[in-house]
Amino acid sequence: MPRCAGSNLLLPAVRYRAASATDADEAVIIFQTRVKLPSELVSYAEVTKASESKTPTVSSGELRHYSNSGVPSGIKQRPTLYYLCHVSAQLPPAFPPSSLQTAMTTTINGKTTATSWAMYMRSLYADRQPPTLGTVAVDKLEEAAREKLKDRIEAFLYVFGSAGTCSTHDYNRNDFHKYKIIPRMLRDATHRTLETTLFGVQYPSPLLLAPIGVQGIVHPDGELATSGAAAKVGIPYIMSTASTRSIEAVAQASGSGPRWYQLYWPKSNELTLSVLSRVKKAGFSALVITLDTMLLGWRPHDIDTAYLPFLHGVGTQVGFTDPVFMAQFGKDAYPVDHAPQWPYDPAHLDERIRQGDETAKEHAFLGERWIGEVASGVFRPWEDLAFLKQNWDGPIILKGIMCPEDAELAIDHGVDGIVVSNHGGRQVDGSISTLYALDKIMQSPKVREAQASGRFTILFDSGIRTGSDVIKAIALGAQAVLYGRPFMYALALGGQDGVESQIRAILADVHVTLGLSGFKNLDEIRGKAGVLARD
């Protein structure tokens, strides 16, 4: 563990400002060196050079402030580095000397541990600066995204919209208000962790980015930005089959970050095998099978405006870059860096098609046939799961389970887990909420026994907006939660930096709420009676 030389090292308020995980690693390394640094400003280049030293000590008072000089493109909006402390041996202590060690050890060796999440909030107060997106309130993010996309409002409404009257979406949110956290006092929650183990892998938090398609309609970087942000924070990114980037491109953007793949199950077994092979080769570790979208839901706004990007070849990039799919039409697979034109303008593409533009016509033709494969209206029976089990050697998770009977059938058919989800209210209008469904599912003795034995994992999706939402879902028995629409609003507003900031914001909210409720880890609340009261 790094230590500070000088037994009288004192700290004023420790100041933080978010930029990126890479900068965090370099900043922490500075605390591990004896390199004599200038007493005033240290440029980014000097930080990088000094980080080459591995001596694990630093003398008090060596670090003062970091400048913006030489900071790589893309993080200039946040001029100082992440987890940098103003250190002085002359000022009265605002924290005990051990605080510096605590702050440093949260990001040692590039690993962001759960103990650091609340520092996001402290950094905003200390810097006297608003968050990257201007707010951490999801309702304000939503309105800001609506304003940002006002000239392409159909793109915003595609993300925002739901099935029918939006009643299922509303039930998802309203039912969170029916469950209340019961805070406990005088309990030791000083040192907290959000660490969560899923399928034998330990993650720093219980948050996963949900599989949302056609992200390229709100930002040109689309899935490259969101997968990159997830990788920086260390949370799993679940790639959608309806992505606007290829499997290989998303894997490259994700780097060494954890990634899962969500499958809209093609009609053709040969095509399914091709997709699974590419997914495995690209380093995706888990397979999430969406069950509730064998055909598209009744979404009035999209219907009224005939807004369906797939029919212009947007959100079909997994298909366009697949050799088996393209061979059906006598064509080679597109390059894996293929991306749709930005911005997506359906009227312009329709006009190009009318004028005989061969590229636009080909994309429309192929897009329609890809949708015919992955949203065909062919409903799979339980017995078909055997095919996937035979051809995928990682965890298989069924997304869309909403009742105890189906959860028990999932156990009977040997899958590894489920996502309690109603697709964010986008498929069945008038459905029960996911929180209600989770509560009922966890009342099944068979489900509880399978979960307790480690054979079966319960994930939760649809409706998560705040830290208290996460706490409530876990208290009802979920092991982790999927986070959806808010990160899309963050993507529209701020690209990768915006998504990363919003992920850190909700994790800080979870971390703070967990402690203020009197708990130091998620095992203390998961499925435990007495954590929640219900109206």
Image (cartoon, rainbow, N blue to C red):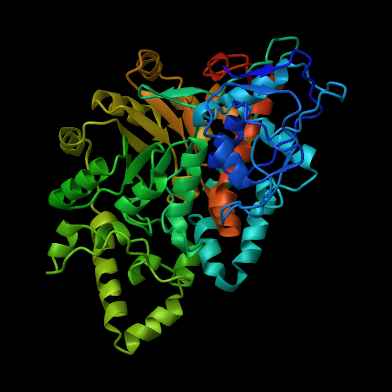
Relative placement, left or right, of 420 versus 117 is left
State the image coordinates of residue 465 (x, y, percent, origin top left): 60, 41
Q: Is residue 432 visible?
A: no
Q: In terms of image quadrants, where is residue 173?
A: top right
Of 166 and 384, nearer the camera is: 384
* Residue appearing at x 78%, y 37% in the figure: 126
Query: How many numbered circles are shown?
Result: 0
Figure check: 46 above or below 225: above
* Rendering coords of residue 312 (x, y %): 35, 71
| Front-most of residues 255 and 47 | 47
The picture places residue 234, in percent across and down from the top left corner, at: 48, 35
Name the residue rendered at 33%, 43% in the picture: 261
Q: Is residue 386 above or below residue 377?
A: above
| Image position of 131 with respect to 195: above or below | below
Residue that sits furthest to the front in the current view:
36
In the rendered image, is residue 231 in sight?
yes
Residue 531, horizontal then vertical, whole percent: 62, 18
Q: Quadrant of the N terminus?
A: top right
The answer to whether 425 appears left or right of 454 in the picture is right
Left or right relative to 13: residue 366: left
Quarter of image, res 8: top right
